[in-house]
Amino acid sequence: MDLFKVGKVTHYYDKLGVAIVELSGDLFVGDKIKFVRGGEDVFEQTVESIQVEHKKIEKAGSGDVIGLKVNEGLKEGAEVYKVQ
């Protein structure tokens, strides 16, 4: 299993269950991702929804800031890795 860092959580909206992620790589709906914080795995999930400025998109790339629906709570600073 290979991990590629694709971004970092800059904010987390608890009530919405949405993480704001600043991307450093490409991310597609359907990708499997893992959140890591302080060297510890937080959780894994499949990307179900990516939004940019409240519009649903299928993919985003390096430099984009996206809203990502997440299955569990997160803290700012968590790193996002694509699982391949």
Image (tube, rainbow, N blue to C red):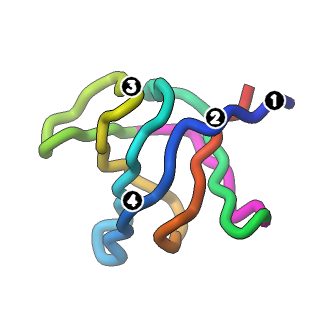
Q: Identify the residue shown where x is 76% and y is 61%.
A: 41
Circle on res. 2: 1
Residue beneath label 4, please?
19
The residues colored magenta run 40-48
Q: Are marks 3 and 4 in contact (CB under 8 Å)?
A: no
> Residue 15 occupies which quadrant of the picture?
bottom left
Residue 71 relative to residue 19: left or right: right
Q: CA distance from mark 2 to mark 3?
A: 13 Å
The image shows residue 9 at horizontal and vertical percentages of 46, 58
Q: Are marks 1 and 3 in contact (CB under 8 Å)?
A: no
The type of residue carrying mark 4 is Ala
In terms of sequence position, does the residue under pointer 2 or pointer 1 come before the other?
Answer: 1
Q: CA distance from mark 2 to mark 4?
A: 15 Å
In terms of sequence position, does the residue under pointer 1 or pointer 3 come before the other?
Answer: 1
In terms of sequence position, does the residue under pointer 2 or pointer 3 come before the other?
Answer: 3
Q: CA distance from mark 3 to mark 4?
A: 16 Å
Q: CA distance from mark 1 to mark 3?
A: 19 Å
The image shows residue 65 at horizontal and vertical percentages of 30, 43
In terms of sequence position, does the residue under pointer 2 or pointer 4 come before the other?
Answer: 4
